[in-house]
Amino acid sequence: VEVAELMHTPVMTITKHQTAGHARELMHTHGVSALPVVGPQGEPLEFSFSGADQEVVSSAGTRGRATLLVFVTTYDMTSQLVLRRVGEAIVRFVPRSNAAAVVLEAPSYAELLPAYRDSLQLPFPVVMSDFATLQGVGPFADIQHVPTLLVLDRTGREVARRQGALSL
């Protein structure tokens, strides 16, 4: 998957209140592999994730620039590969874009995040998911696979979602 492929329009979306079953049915019916979740009436998504060193990644802090959120687990090698590639690519677009890794693990592992970020030499924050996201009911709906890369436009609307490895 090339980054340019993530930016095609038009984009079919669902709201966070629709079920995962409904989303799967739409994806199957329309032959799409990604279905972004938007707020009611296409409103920007609201989120806030924090890390170990008082680091916060939030919708308020990312507005005004395109944002890549990569949902990962620390023990998954594909997640690590995608994070390294995003890190290499994002430096070409700073300050016009943001990136962050969101770790889908228990909050007790938050103290390990700085070492994880440093070992992968990531130029962006690594933060912990909130409880709602872990339960599949947060603003990004049910994230079933890692890594999952989400692209938010400058207003905070989800415009693309990809799972698995990608080439940048």
Image (cartoon, helix red, strand yellow):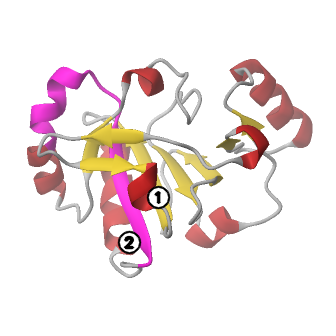
Magenta segment: does it hold 106? yes
Q: Is residue 73 left or right of residue 164?
A: left
Instruction: Pinpoint residue 74: horizontal percent, then vertical percent.
Output: 25, 36
- Tell me the SS state at disc 1: strand
Instruction: Pinpoint residue 127: horizontal percent, then vertical percent.
Output: 27, 42
Circle 1 packing at 10 Å, graded few (<14), some (14-19), many (20+), is many
Residue at 38% over, 72% down: 90
Magenta segment: does it hold 61? no
Circle 2 packing at 10 Å, graded few (<14), some (14-19), many (20+), is many
Instruction: Pinpoint residue 65: horizontal percent, then vertical percent.
Output: 49, 70
Q: Amino acid at mark 1?
A: Leu
Using the image as rendered, state which of residue 19 and residue 53 is in the foreground: 53
Q: Is residue 22 above or below residue 9?
A: above
The residue segment tinted magenta is: 96-113
Q: Quadrant of residue 83?
A: bottom left
Using the image as rendered, state which of residue 110 and residue 5 is in the foreground: 110
Instruction: Pinpoint residue 103: horizontal percent, then vertical percent.
Output: 32, 36
Q: Is residue 88 left or right of residue 67?
A: left
Determine which residue is flagged by label 2. 90
Determine which residue is flagged by label 1. 68
Q: Is residue 5 above or below residue 44?
A: below
Q: Amino acid at mark 2?
A: Ile
Residue at 68% over, 43% down: 38
- Tell me the SS state at disc 2: helix
C-alpha separation, residue under disc 2 versus residue under disc 1: 9 Å
Quadrant placement of the N terminus: bottom right
Asked whether the beta carbons under mark 2 and mark 1 sit within 8 Å of each other, the answer is yes
Q: Is residue 16 above or below residue 11?
A: above
